[in-house]
Image (cartoon, helix red, strand yellow):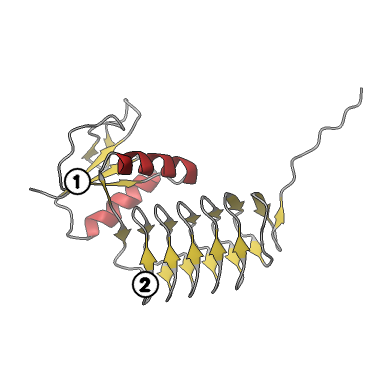
Amino acid sequence: MKKRLLIFGCSGHGKVILDLAGKGKQYEEICFLDDNPQERGIMGVPVLGGRDFSDFRDTDEVIVAIGNCHIRANIQEYFAGKGIGIATLIHPQSTIGTHVRLGKGTVVMAGAVINSDTEIGEGCIINTAASVDHDCMVERFCHVAVGANIAGGVHIGELSWIGAGAVVSNHISICRNCLIGAGAVVVRDIEEMGTYTGVPAKKLQRERRVSHG
């Protein structure tokens, strides 16, 4: 039976996943799933259905091509709960060190570097040209965006997003469900959920409305 990859999400990220998966020889067929009933496919690859798709084969694997960490977690856990295999994809032009552990559903894009004794949880995205150095822990369903640099000994809590070009200094701990803005530089532990921007990174406070009543 042919081994088939089903990519959930017809988006720009889905295109990159399609390109990545096509560079290996592990899948003989690649198709899309998407909950938008108007979606017919991208780059000549058809959409077979959405989350309600039921015509799975025993050898099928699913990868969720959605950047939003919370939505990706929800969809991956939905398919895993149905007993569908979850793929892990590594671009051949990435660099993976020794004793690196990658969770199911994680994708490592072109030019990314993950150095020794680092653990990446399930459902993570290590995006194009991002780097995660030695002895790091990136918990489940995080997104290390394009060109972000994570120094050695860093711990990133689940569902966190490290923005494009952001830098996290050595031995920093970032709690769960944080968004580090593009180009931000994190030099202190982050213990409170929220959005952090700037150099050095500081929590973005909501704008206060002033009453002139």
Residues tagged 2 and 1 counted as in contact (Cβ below 8 A) = no
Q: Can residue 119 be seen?
A: yes
Residue assigned mark 2 = 95
| Dot 2 crowding, Cα within 10 Å, few <14, some 14–19, many 20+ | some
Q: Is residue 95 above or below residue 198?
A: below
Nearer-N-terminus badge (2/1) = 1
Q: Is residue 213 above or below residue 192?
A: above
The mark lying in front, picked from 2 and 1, is 1
Q: Is residue 196 above or below residue 58?
A: below
73 with respect to 167 (left or right): left
Secondary structure beneath label 2: strand
| Amino acid type at mark 1 | Asp
Q: Residue at x 51, y 50 (%)?
A: 159
Secondary structure beneath label 1: loop
97 with respect to 177 (left or right): left
| Amino acid type at mark 2 | Thr
Residue assigned mark 1 = 60
| Dot 1 crowding, Cα within 10 Å, few <14, some 14–19, many 20+ | many
Q: Residue at x 29, y 56 (%)?
A: 20
Residue 67 rendering spot, x and y as whole percentages: 45, 46
Residue 89 rendering spot, x and y as whole percentages: 30, 58
Residue 158 rendering spot, x and y as whole percentages: 51, 53
Q: Is residue 82 above or below residue 93?
A: above
31 with respect to 94 (left or right): left
Residue extending furthest toward the top: 213
Q: Can residue 10 be seen?
A: no
Residue extending furthest toward the left: 1
Q: Residue at x 31, y 56 (%)?
A: 88
* Separation (CA) of disc 2 from disc 1: 27 Å
